[in-house]
Image (cartoon, rainbow, N blue to C red):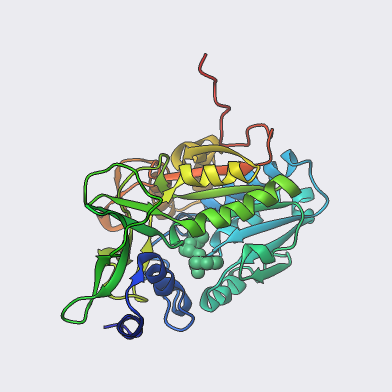
Amino acid sequence: MSKLANILRESIAADGPLPVETFMAVALGHPEFGYYMTRDPFGASGDFVTAPEVSQMFGELIGLWAAEAWAALGSPERVSLVELGPGRGPLMADALRAARVAPAFFAALDVHLVETSPVLIEAQRRTLARAGVSVTWHSALEDVPEGPAIVIANEFFDAMPVRHYVKTPRGWCLRLVGLTETGALGFGVSSEPEPHLVAQAPDGSVLEISPTSHQIMNVLAQRIAKDGCAALVIDYGHVETGLGETLQALKNHRSVDPLAEPGEADLTAHVDFAALTRAAVAAGAEVQGPAAQGEFLMRLGIEQRATTLKRKATLEQAKSIDQAFERLVTAETFVGPGGAKSFGMGTLFKVLAVVPRGTPPLPGFVREVPNV
Ligand code: SAH
């Protein structure tokens, strides 16, 4: 049993069950034993692989996107290039290298990274040591200096805690993590239903919401509306709010029981892009998309980039560029390294831009044709 499981069991025995939301926040962010606080979970030997870890093309195209977004915001003299939850920092490193083709943008930018994990801050420091720009770390978006900014968040919102309500004959009850008869962690529900939730649904239905995500989007969108910033949110998730839970735990690239080893497995939930859009619009900003990641990257020219990279590649490298391209863009299963089959990220992952009202479509997004 993990150290954190023992801490949680003691806390539940003393003070009662915890909402799923608190469990997830503690499992990921406990200062001593939280999943992200203690390790570097990325790559083939880690628990999962993210798009910038798959290929340099991803970060490069986002760097070029950021340069275009900066121009669309009126090319402000100084701009913060902000990343939320940069992991080991590959996206920013690739974005900065690509952004050098836009010297005016490169000269205008300061990098601000929002990260809570000391282990990953060190990894980011190493990755960006020779990037040639000033880098400042912050523990929350609120601490990033005011003013024009381009904000990138790849697989950040899926790590934000979710709250679950379960439909029972009494009404919608908060889902809790308590102790089973044998003393293990187990799911239960609150005895009193939530009085404000009245939606009709069959008993056993689960409603999943991420108040932390909405709160962060609220802060982000207020800045976007006030300071002329733009944000790009990339994550897996759904475009319409619906019933059902998506909380999942991953360890060594395999799905595991979310309660089995808190602090030792990654916990994520799908991002509700409709809810993020509502939060952004309510705070005075506007959105473009969500677009499917595959379409977005194709519109940004990933195919041409792959062709260019392959020109200077060995046969082996060319093969891995082709595989990375497939993985980032396709919606289907594809054959990855070692012949293993994997799912493509092309449609499961979505891209949402949050921009000031009236901003013309940014690269990767098309203007919605009104239905007349
Ligand atoms: N964007 C990276 C990593 C995604 S994993 C990539 O695509 O490879 C999630 C990242 O968010 C990690 O860096 C994690 O430490 C960070 N993170 C998790 N919760 C956070 C929080 N509340 N505030 C800031 N960063 C957080």
Q: Is residue 40 left or right of residue 147?
A: left
* In the image, farthest residue toward the left: 182
Q: Position of residue 245 (x, y in %)?
A: 31, 53
**Does residue 60 sit above or below 159 in this rendering?**
above
122 above or below 258?
A: below
306 or 24, which is in the foreground? 24
Answer yes or no: is residue 57 visible: no
Does 92 sit left or right of 146 as displayed? left
Residue at the farthest top position: 372
List x then y, in percent, for residue 86: 55, 63
Q: Residue at x 49, y 81 (%)?
A: 31
Report whether residue 95 is seen: yes
Q: Residue 356 at what x, y percent from top left?
A: 68, 40
Image quadrant where residue 257 sits: bottom left
User: Which residue does the image show at 38% across and 57% down from the upper left?
Assistant: 269
Task: Depth check: give the residue in front, 160 or 231.
Answer: 160
